[in-house]
Amino acid sequence: MIKTRKFLKTKCKVTFELPEALAEGAEEVYLVGDFNNWDEHATLMEKKRGNRFVLELSLDLNKEYQYRYLINGTNWQNDWDADKYVANPFMGDNSVVVTTPPTDSE
């Protein structure tokens, strides 16, 4: 899930956390997406106590990034708390995180 977002002048720090239901039995989890050219081994999430997997990324502002979780090298999962979803070429959906700061009226 997208745990937190912190908006800076030119970046948005986004904290991702794999939902506990998906983390059961996970040994390693990679966050894979537009931000790392869909490299399945580039962005390893940190395993925390209680079988939690967490990662903070610094992303450019005012963009949308598609991503998915890769669990144990074979199990692709979406983030069901993502900002939105888009169809992928594999007959499924990708999760999307939006890095546009909220307006004062939101």
Image: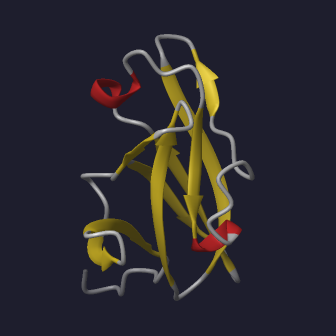
Left or right, residue 22 beside residue 49 = left
- Of all residues, the one furthest to the right in this rendering is 42
- At a point 54% along the width and 30% down the height, the residue shown is 72
Q: Position of residue 30 (x, y in %)?
A: 60, 43
Q: Is 12 displayed left or right of 100 in the figure?
A: right
- Which residue is drawn at the image coordinates 75% and 52% (left, top)? 42
Point out residue 67 in the picture as x, y percentages from the top left corner.
47, 64
Q: Position of residue 86 (x, y in %)?
A: 29, 78
Q: Is residue 30 left or right of residue 99?
A: right
User: Which residue is at a point 24% across and 52% down the rendered structure image?
Assistant: 80
Looking at the image, the residue that sits furthest to the top is 50
In the figure, 42 relative to 22: above or below? below
When asked about the image quadrant of residue 25, the answer is top left
**Where in the figure is residue 18, as x and y percent of width and height?**
43, 37
The residue closer to the viewer here, 20 or 76, is: 76
Q: How many marks?
A: 0
Q: Is 50 in front, or is 28?
A: 28
- Residue visible at 59% across and 19% down? 48
Q: How is the image coloured?
A: secondary structure
Instruction: For the C terminus, give its image quadrant.
Output: bottom left
Is residue 104 positioned above or below 45 on the image?
below
